[in-house]
Amino acid sequence: MLGTRGIWKDGWKAVAVHAPLTGTSNFDKDAWELYHVDVDRSEANNLAEQEPEGLNELIQVWFDEAARNNVLPLDDRSAVEIIGIERPTSEPARDTYIYCPHTACVPEGVAVNIRGRDRKILANVAIEDEDTSGVIFAHGSRFGAHSLFLKDKKLYYVYNFLGIQPEQVFESNVELKPGAYTLGMEFDATGTGDNGEVLGSMKLYIDDQEVASGDLRTQSGKFTLSGDGLCVGYDSGDAVSQMYTTPGEFTGGAI
């Protein structure tokens, strides 16, 4: 997976661990290991130095099988690059997506792609009582995600960068009273950080009033490989933010 290779033959196993996450690795520099798994099931004894001929034989078997199964040429792109490849789609390109509340969560592979891009998230919300609260929008999990929600009469936008604490929290400087509002956020990308993360400025809005702002650090890779998709009106799976628990359903009003 992601460049790590392995082959078994006649009770012997050869493996080469690859390190694609850095984006600077090289297949020619991978160190191959050799194990006699018929007698060493835990793979505790690396026999690569003691059995160089056997190791070279298995390496050649690996390349023969790779060629036969259309694995070559080897792909040395980083995990972030591979995961971020746009998938083929029958839909035309667009710059506006509309999602409705209380539908099944939308997997990230087919949801709107916001990575590295300027964006706005807007929701028309009716607050019907003083205790209206819950998730308006959520995408991802506690290991990386963002969410727009109401809590204690305030509007919040939280960006959870790779599960690293503390969370990036933006809280409205005014309380919300019963009524109809357009609530949302806006992100303007300004550049990239040392590790490839996308940096920019974030503004939180209630109608046309800016109620919070600040710098925001965002992921360049996907939030998830599976599950924890894009949700409106609740948060599936792991909670995006520690400020609420799932499902965090929106109550006391309508989206």
Image (cartoon, helix red, strand yellow):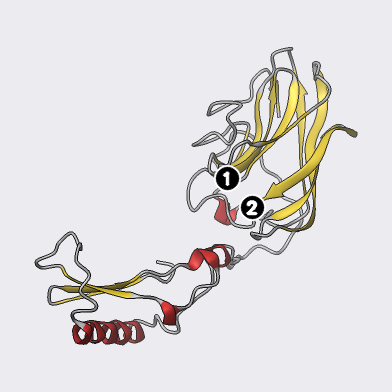
* Residue type highlighted by circle 2: Gln
The disc label shown at residue 219, or none: 2
Q: Is residue 128 left or right of residue 110?
A: right
Q: Are marks 1 and 2 in contact (CB under 8 Å)?
A: yes
Q: Is residue 190 above or below residue 162?
A: below
Tell me where residue 75 appears, x and y as whole percent. Answer: 48, 77
**Can the viewer see residue 23 in this picture?**
yes
Residue name at image x 64 percent, y 36 percent: 167
Callout 2 secondary element: loop
Q: Which of the 4 image quadrants contains residue 126?
A: top right
Q: Residues within 10 Å of mark 2 (few under 14, many from 20)?
A: many
Q: Is residue 129 above or below residue 198?
A: above
Q: Residues within 10 Å of mark 1 (few under 14, many from 20)?
A: many
Disc 1: which residue:
144
Callout 1 secondary element: strand
Q: Is residue 142 above or below residue 244?
A: below
* Residue type highlighted by circle 1: Gly
**Can the viewer see residue 204 in this picture?**
no
Q: Is residue 186 left or right of residue 72?
A: right
What distance separates the C-alpha of mark 1 from that of mark 2? Answer: 8 Å
Residue at the extreme top: 130
Tell me where residue 122 appears, x and y as whole percent. Answer: 77, 39
Residue name at image x 59 percent, y 37 percent: 165
Residue name at image x 65 percent, y 62 percent: 91
Quadrant where the N terminus is found in the figure: bottom left
The mark nearer the N terminus, 1 or 2, is 1
